[in-house]
Amino acid sequence: MIAQQMRYDGEVIVVAGGGGAIGGAAAELFAARGAKVVVNDISENAHAVCESINAAGGTAIASIASAVTEAKLIVQTALDAFGRIDVVLNTTGLTHVGLFHTISAEDWDRSFDSHFTSTLELARAAWAALSASGNGRLINSSSTTIFGGEYCSPYIAPKGAIFAAGRAWALEGRSQNIRVNTIMPTAISQMNDNLPDPVLVQVYREYFQPEKVAGFLGWLAHKDNTLSGHTFVVGGGQAAHVYLVEAAPVFVANPESPEAWAQHAAALTSKVQAVAPDNVADEMRLRLEAMGLPTGNLANHAGWASQE
């Protein structure tokens, strides 16, 4: 059976970082399937993407602006041109390599802002329009580097923040007609095309084309997809669900004693009997249940915050 083509007719999609490899491929896919696209980038590459889209019969306009400082302008450009916003896709970001303690504050902030602050500000500026659409979708870009990496902490830190913030925003979006999801994409791009390992670069070029990420984004951004609060590794024709897990708790008779904990290092670092809390209230419920204590009404308080 041939599945019906997923289309975006009548929808307006803002692609931040649309002049890049993944953002550009996603913008072209959305436009080819009926969306009106605002291609945002700090680079003039956004114009080239728009020219390609419009030459193919699609509709796209460029917005050359930084979401860090001009998010409201990007949103207003979309509203002035098309009257609404249904989807915002964040694919922006720079990188800076070096030992973290040798990287200047200016370079750190520049990298951090290009990822997290740009994502935050554009989400903030577009939130009301996404809610007004009745079925708003916000998709942000984290990275598999949050599993651990070295020499690029100004890149990894904001990607971790995006992962965490997306889980919170998805909970807040439930009452406001907005779904929030996150991807951790792998694709050949301007960021990795000049890696010092030529073999790895060749693998990227041969197997990890940005179009393979764009197809997944097309599914995730479609109005009929009801997922929210999820994160996916995606690239090379495969995708995997990413979630936080917590191993089985370790109890000691006298937790006031450092020596008591020292005897359980192996158990405390094990990865067995893991559970995956959906939110902070769910995590506290699991802890209370393990202690044999009443959980009260925690299930109805996903926004509750622990005093840690």
Image (tube, rainbow, N blue to C red):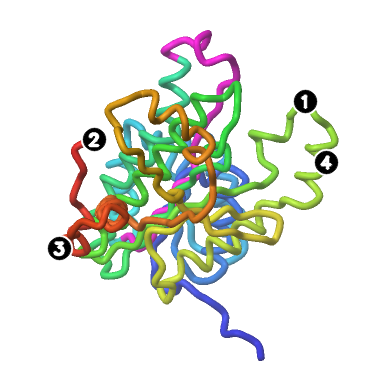
Query: If the image is split into quadrants, where does the C terminus sit?
Result: top left
- Left or right relative to 298: residue 121: right
Q: Residue at x 47, y 16 (%)?
A: 107
Q: Earlier in the sequence, mark 3 or mark 1?
A: 1
**Residue 128 on image: x %, y %:** 21, 55
Query: If the image is split into quadrants, where does the N terminus sit?
Result: bottom right
Amino acid on which disc 2 is placed: Glu
Name, please, the residue furthest toward the bottom. Answer: 1
Q: Residue at x 60, y 25 (%)?
A: 150
Q: Mark 1 highlights which residue?
A: 196
Q: Earlier in the sequence, mark 4 or mark 1?
A: 1
Q: Mark 2 highlights which residue?
A: 308
Which of labels 2 and 1 is toward the front?
2
Q: Classify 192 as above or below 19.
A: above
Q: Looking at the image, can residue 286 be seen?
A: yes
Which of labels 3 and 1 is toward the front?
3
**Residue 76 on image: x %, y %:** 28, 48
Amino acid on which disc 4 is placed: Gln
Q: Residues within 10 Å of mark 3 (few under 14, many from 20)?
A: few
Look at the image and give the residue range highlighted in magenta.
85-106
Q: Mark 3 highlights which residue?
A: 297
Q: Earlier in the sequence, mark 3 or mark 2?
A: 3
Q: Are marks 4 and 2 in contact (CB under 8 Å)?
A: no
Q: Earlier in the sequence, mark 2 or mark 1?
A: 1
- Left or right relative to 113: residue 304: left
Q: CA distance from mark 4 to mark 1?
A: 11 Å
As drawn, the label of residue 202 is: 4
Q: Are marks 2 and 1 in contact (CB under 8 Å)?
A: no
Q: Secondary structure at mark 2?
A: loop
As drawn, the label of residue 49 is: none
Q: CA distance from mark 3 to mark 2?
A: 20 Å
